């Protein structure tokens, strides 16, 4: 049996949802029951709007263009429905390193 990257991502995301609900003490607000938020970076709303939080600034690496298109391709979604939001220190991003350097922003 061969598994595609898209099938793996969908399966992994579904498994992550269970873990996300298991740790309310992490300081994140619980997502609505009809919203899928497997981690701090990704949220899919019932209207099929996808929100992607980026922890890097746009410095020519394609953070605000390349990453949403890659995400839409992997989720088999309409890339025009992907919103990009800048991550902020604290809250759901507490402990996540936020810096922009080299080409690591899009790799």
Image: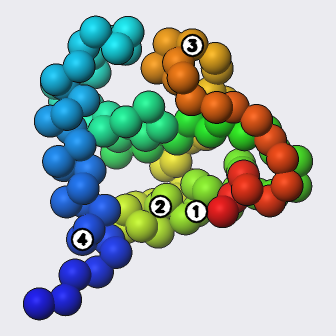
Relative to the observer, which residue lies in front, 92 or 42?
92
Q: Secondary structure at mark 4?
A: helix
Q: How far apart are labels 3 and 1 at the CA level? A: 27 Å
Mark 3–mark 1 CB contact (< 8 Å): no
**Residue bearing the label numbered 3:** 90
Please report contact status of discs 3 and 4: CB closer than 8 Å, yes or no. no
Q: Looking at the image, can residue 45 be seen?
A: no
Task: Check the image and report above or below for 40 versus 76.
Answer: above
Relative side of 90 to 11, left or right: right
Q: Position of residue 98 (x, y in %)?
A: 69, 31
- Give the secondary structure at mark 2: helix
> Toward the viewer: 29 or 103?
103
Q: Seen in the image, is 64 located left or right of residue 2?
A: right
Apparent side of residue 67 relative to residue 5 in the rendered image (left or right): right
| Callouts 2 and 3 close, C-beta under 8 Å | no
How crowded pointer 2 is (Cα within 10 Å; few <14, some 14-19, many 20+) is rated as: some
The percent position of residue 18, horizontal first and vertical second, equals: 14, 36
Residue 31 locus on image (x, y percent): 28, 21
Q: Between tags 3 and 1, which lies in front?
A: 3
Above or below, comparing residue 41 to residue 70 in the picture: above
Q: Earlier in the sequence, mark 2 or mark 3?
A: 2
Q: Which residue is mark 2?
A: 72
């Amino acid at each position: 049996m061969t598994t595609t990257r898209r099938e793996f991502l969908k399966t992994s995301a579904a498994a992550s949802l269970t873990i996300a609900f298991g740790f309310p003490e992490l300081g994140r607000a619980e997502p609505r029951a009809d919203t899928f938020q497997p981690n701090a970076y990704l949220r899919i709303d019932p209207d099929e709007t996808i929100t992607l939080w980026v922890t890097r600034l746009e410095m020519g690496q394609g953070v605000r263009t390349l990453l949403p298109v890659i995400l839409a391709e992997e989720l088999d979604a309409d890339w025009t429905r992907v919103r990009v939001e800048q991550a902020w220190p604290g809250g759901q991003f507490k402990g996540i390193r936020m810096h922009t350097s080299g080409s690591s922003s899009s790799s």
